[in-house]
Image (cartoon, coloured by chain):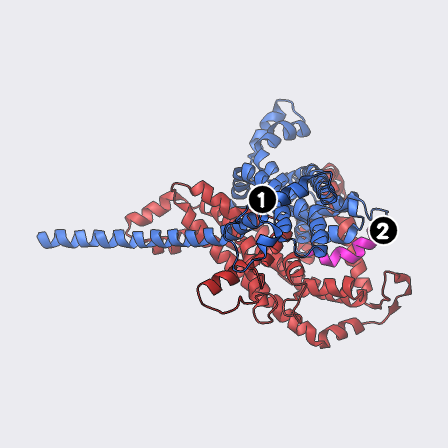
Chain colours: A red, B blue
Amino acid sequence: MTIVTGKTEARRKLQPVRSGALRNIWAHRADYAYVLPAIAVMLVVIAYPIYYTIELSFYKTPPGLQLRDKTFIGFDNYTTILTSEVFWKVTWNTLIWTFGSTFISFVLGFATALALHRDFVGRGVLRAILIIPWVISAVAASYIWKWIYHSDFGIIGAVLVGLGLTDRPPNFIDNVSTVLPSLIVVNIWREFPFAMIMMMAGLQTVPEQLLRAAKVDGANAWQRFWHVTFPHLRNVSVVTILLLAVANFNSFIIPWIMTAGGPSNASHIWITHIYELAFGRQRWGVASAYSVLLFLILMALGYFYVRALSGNERKEGSA
Amino acid sequence: MSTIAEATARGQTRRRMRIDGWRWAGRIFLLFMLLYTAVPMIWMLITSIKSGFAATQFPPQWWPDEPTLASYQKLLDPQNSVGQDFLRFFWNSLFVSTVTTILSVIVAVPAAYAFSRFTFPGRNFLFFAVLLRNMFPAVIFLVPLFILMRAIGLVNTHGSLILTYLTFGLPLAIWLLKGFYDNIPVQLEQAARIDGATRFQAFIMIVMPLSTPGIIATAIYSFIGAWNEYIYAYTFLSKNEQLTLPVGIQRFFSENTTDFPGLMAASFMMSVPVVVLFLVLQRYFVRALTEGAVKH
């Protein structure tokens, strides 16, 4: 979808010099040298795998990676997926995971950025502490939280028992109904700092004079936020939400290390499910078909993603 | 007269109270976020200085009766097999992350500069293609990349990791740096070129120094990404002596499932380098985000 947009844009650019598109490319040959290394790496590591995944998705593959013995079966892998019950379960989990994590991370990050905007003693230290979870590896975070949720020695369970709320420490991640929310809490822990940094950066671009003018005109704190600050942050908000959504949709480590999709698929999301199909059950063909479906979804999302990320591009172009 | 004064006074107190309300809500919220962020990390540290026995008590010891650094000694002792493994994983992670970082900067800087300054045919298409890379999850590329790496003989080498890590750091690096270059006035370069500098000299001597925060931010981002990466390392490497920290720790503790103090100590030490690096350089990072990504 986006690729098409890109091509037409390029073509539009070329039109004035229609007589020599090739000459134009030749005239700019030196420019390509700058982007060549980046493009070359991308081609090897991205274009080839995409092609290969699409090819594999139409084949029945033997276990092991003896892919010479694969047989062509058309769209069978796709029908297998769309008619399986697990597919809908996993899709539902993925939606909850992606929307829940993205929305709450963004709101918490934005609120923290606002609360940190005013100067006070210890602000720098507080900000530094709040960023740390984002930097910590997801593997370490998964282990830390697994230990916190531990059904016998976990700190949350101990506090709940200590307060007399339950008799026994609850079992957060071995329980079908609590496992997904528990993992989302971990994910938000790691991700809200990113939203916070982005929104802090955004807040610095809100002109101080406008806020002061609004104050002189009698606007209260909420009105100043809603009519001055927020409109200025629209672009950065869209970019942040999209980056978070893509990262969440693609996340793997936290559910994989903490539960490996269990219990009974309650915490499987698309990515962990694909990984298990491929490397656990060695059903490469089905896993590839899943990947292609994922691709299509991501391309649709990608349209908005690229538009948001290259926002300034368009403005310059139209000006 | 007096009623007016009273009314103004009342209005003022009401306004002050309303502002104070927001301020207090902010403080309470920050306190809540601080607890949410810090408690898990503090609990990790406290657990790491317990003995294995003290860690598995109920109710838990909030502060260990006998704090001990045994877990750290074990992990850092080159004589002991656990320590040997841990230090090797640490070294592997450091090597892979450093090489990835250097290469990303070398590749991203010229690309971002070209996307910002030149208008060659296909520029938008290529820029979008680069950005799109970030959309796709590692898992999609795993099987074909594994086959590819096997074909070019890179399986079980750190080269396979460096090559793949490069690509997922690049899109954001290029995007961030491009935003940075967009904000550097072209006139500066033009002035240098009038004075006889070549385009390349102008780039090296004028543009590069001005974009240092962007380059530092890019470098931190690549380093942290590579240091924390798990799934490719998990798939591409099978020899114990080549594992990077996240995979090494996961392998080790899936065999020793009850050594919680050891696991927490290892998690802590794995986090230290990136956290320190980030905290030291974070002002560049925030500045780069402000100038590169937000200020359009």
Q: Nearer the viewer, mark 2 or mark 1?
A: 1
Mark 1 sits on what residue?
Answer: B68
The picture places residue B242, in percent across and down from the top left corner, at: 78, 45
The picture places residue A97, in percent across and down from the top left corner, at: 59, 64
Using the image as rendered, state which of residue B133 and residue B203 is in the foreground: B133
SS assignment at label 2: helix
Using the image as rendered, state which of residue B257 and residue B196 is in the foreground: B257
Residue B138 colored magenta?
Answer: yes
Q: Quadrant of residue A247?
A: bottom right
Mark 2 sits on what residue?
Answer: B150
Q: Is residue B15 left or right of residue A113?
A: left
In the depicted structure, whether residue B220 falls above or below residue B168:
above
Give the number of marks.
Answer: 2
The picture places residue A166, in percent across and down from the top left corner, at: 48, 69
The residue at 63%/43% (across/down) is B72
Image: magenta residue range: B137-149
**What's the amino acid at mark 1?**
Thr
Mark 2 touches mark 1? (CB < 8 Å): no
| Chain identifier of the residue bearing label 1 in the image | B
The picture places residue A36, in percent across and down from the top left corner, at: 74, 41
Q: CA separation, marks 2 and 1?
A: 45 Å
In the depicted structure, whether residue B111 falls above or below residue A151:
above
